[in-house]
Image (cartoon, rainbow, N blue to C red):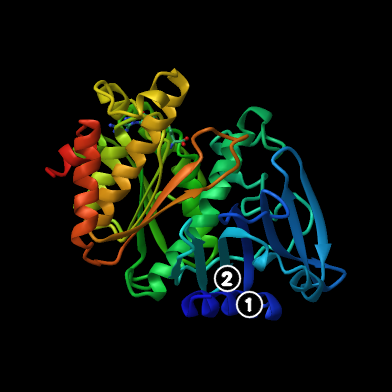
C-alpha cells in the first residue's frame, strides 16, 4: 500500500476510534476487481442513551438500511478495507478525501473546513429556525399559528440546509484569516443576490445574529415590488438598521463590496451575474446554488464525438449541459484564486436544483494544467460561458 494512503487511512481510523472529532464518513465507488458490501455506506455519530453509536446507512442501489453500532463494533466490520474507491471523512476540524483510481493510485485531499456534528438519531434534524419565529410568519413560510405552510416546506428546508453550510464555511474562512472576525464595530457583510421573497436573506440575518455574529445583510432583486415588500417586513421586525433591500440588476448593482455572497436559485445567467459580482467585489466566500441552466445548453449545437451518444436524449443533454455549466463556473473561480467545491446541499426530493458551489478566496494560484483543462473544455464543446464573458476571460 502507498505510504500516503496508509497514513490517510490511519488518520480516518483514529478519528473513528476517538469519535469526539468525527462528523461523517461516506464510502462509495468500487475499486477495480473488488466487491463492496453495498453500493454506498454513510456513517454518522448519534447519541443513544448518552452513548455514542455509529449510525450506518447502507444502500444496495434500491433500498436503504440503517443500523447502529458502537465505534469498536463498526471498526471491527473493516468497511475501510472492503473495496470502496472513495472514502470521505468529515470532522469538526477538517476533512480527508481519499480516492483510489482504477490504476490503484491514491488521490488524497485534506481541507480545514469545519463540519458541525448533529447527534440526533432520528431522521428529523434539530431545527435551526423555529417555525414560529416571527420572521418566518412575516415572510409567509409559516402560518399565523407558527406552523410551516405545506406549500413552503421545501423552501423552509432549503433555507435551513443552506444555513447549515453557511455557518461552518464562514467560521472556517474566519479561522483561516480570509474574513476578519466580525465585531459590532466591524460587522460581517452578506449579500443575497436574486433574493426574491428574501426567505434566505432574512434567515441568514436572524440566524447569524442568533449565533452572536454581528452582520449587515443586503438583499438584491431586480423587482421593485420585492424591495418594497422586504423592506416593509424588515421595518415591522425592527431590524431595518442591519438588513436592507435594493431593487437592482445584479450586474448593475450599486453595492460594491461584501464579505460573503450568497445566491439561491438566481435564474439562469443571474447566477453568473452573482458569481461575477462576488469575484469583482472580492467577496471572500461565495455560496451559490444555481437555478435553471440555459446559456451553455443553447450553445451545445456542434457536439463532439463520442458525446453525441449522450446528447441525443434530451434529458441527458440537459443534465450534461447543467454539469458543464457548473464545472466551467467552478473552474473559472479556481483560476481566479478560489478554492471551490460542489456540494449537494439538500436532498433531491426538496428541489432538483440541489447543487451548491462553495468558493473560498484563498488567492492560491492555479497551475497551468488547470488553465489548459478549461481551455480544452470550452474548445471541445465550442462554448463561451456567460461567466467568462462577464469577467472578460
Ligand atoms: C427563482 S427566484 C429565487 C428567489 C430566492 N433566492 C429564493 O430562493 O426564494 C429568482 C429571483 O432572482 C431575481 N432575478 C433574476 N434575474 C435577476 C437579475 N439579473 N438581477 C437581480 N435579480 C434577478 C428574480 O426577480 C427572482 O426574484
Place residue 226 in its image quadrant. top left
As drawn, the residue found furthest toward the front would be 33
* For residue 227, side relative to residue 345 (left or right): left
* For residue 250, side relative to residue 108 (left or right): left
Q: Which residue bears the numbered disc 1? A: 15
Place residue 221 in its image quadrant. top left
Label 2 vs label 1, nearer the camera:
1
Q: Is the C-beta separation of discs 2 and 1 under 8 Å?
A: yes
Q: Position of residue 320 (x, y in %)?
A: 40, 32
| Residue at the image position 50 percent from the left and 61 percent from the top | 99
Residue 91 tag number? 2
Which secondary structure, mark 2?
strand
| Residue at the image position 67 percent from the left and 37 percent from the top | 148
Which secondary structure, mark 1?
helix
Place residue 189 in its image quadrant. bottom left
Question: Quarter of the image containing the C terminus?
Answer: top left
Residues packed near mark 1 inside 10 Å, few (<14), some (14 to 19) or many (20 plus): some
Q: Position of residue 269 (x, y in %)?
A: 29, 32
Amino acid at each position: 500500500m502507498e505510504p500516503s494512503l496508509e497514513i490517510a487511512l490511519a488518520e480516518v481510523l483514529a478519528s473513528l476510534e476517538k469519535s469526539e472529532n468525527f462528523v461523517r464518513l461516506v464510502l462509495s465507488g468500487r475499486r477495480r476487481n473488488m466487491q463492496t458490501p453495498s453500493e454506498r455506506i454513510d456513517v454518522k455519530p448519534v447519541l443513544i442513551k448518552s452513548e455514542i453509536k455509529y449510525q450506518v446507512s447502507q444502500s444496495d442501489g434500491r433500498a436503504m438500511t440503517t443500523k447502529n453500532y458502537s465505534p469498536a463494533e463498526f471498526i471491527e466490520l473493516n468497511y475501510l478495507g472492503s473495496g470502496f474507491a472513495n472514502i470521505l471523512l468529515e470532522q469538526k476540524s477538517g476533512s480527508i478525501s481519499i480516492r483510489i483510481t482504477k490504476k490503484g493510485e491514491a488521490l488524497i485531499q485534506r481541507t480545514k473546513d469545519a463540519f458541525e456534528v448533529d447527534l440526533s438519531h432520528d431522521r428529523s434534524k434539530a431545527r435551526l429556525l423555529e417555525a414560529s419565529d416571527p420572521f418566518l410568519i412575516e415572510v409567509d413560510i409559516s402560518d399565523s399559528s407558527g406552523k410551516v405552510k405545506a406549500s413552503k416546506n421545501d423552501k423552509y428546508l432549503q433555507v435551513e440546509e443552506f444555513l447549515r453550510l453557511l455557518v461552518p464555511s464562514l467560521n472556517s474562512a474566519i479561522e483561516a484569516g480570509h474574513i476578519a472576525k466580525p465585531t459590532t464595530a466591524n460587522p460581517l457583510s452578506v449579500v443575497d443576490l436574486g433574493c426574491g421573497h428574501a426567505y434566505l436573506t432574512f434567515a441568514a440575518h436572524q440566524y447569524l445574529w442568533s449565533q452572536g455574529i454581528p452582520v449587515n445583510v443586503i438583499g438584491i432583486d431586480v423587482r421593485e415590488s420585492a424591495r418594497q415588500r422586504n423592506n416593509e417586513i424588515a421595518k415591522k421586525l425592527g431590524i431595518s438598521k442591519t438588513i436592507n433591500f435594493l431593487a437592482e440588476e445584479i450586474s448593475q448593482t450599486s453595492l460594491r463590496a461584501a464579505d460573503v455572497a450568497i445566491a439561491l436559485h438566481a435564474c439562469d445567467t443571474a447566477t453568473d451575474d452573482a458569481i461575477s459580482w462576488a469575484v469583482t467585489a472580492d467577496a471572500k466566500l461565495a455560496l451559490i446554488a444555481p437555478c435553471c441552466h440555459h446559456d451553455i445548453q443553447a450553445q451545445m449545437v456542434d457536439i463532439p464525438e463520442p458525446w453525441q451518444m449522450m446528447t441525443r436524449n434530451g434529458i441527458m443533454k440537459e443534465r450534461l449541459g447543467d454539469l458543464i455549466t457548473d464545472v466551467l463556473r467552478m473552474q473559472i473561480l479556481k483560476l481566479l484564486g478560489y478554492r471551490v467545491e460542489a456540494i449537494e446541499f439538500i436532498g433531491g426530493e426538496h428541489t432538483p436544483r440541489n447543487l451548491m458551489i462553495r468558493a473560498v478566496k484563498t488567492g492560491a494560484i492555479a497551475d497551468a494544467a488547470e488553465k489548459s483543462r478549461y481551455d480544452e473544455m470550452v474548445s471541445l464543446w465550442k462554448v463561451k460561458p456567460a461567466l467568462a464573458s462577464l469577467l472578460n476571460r
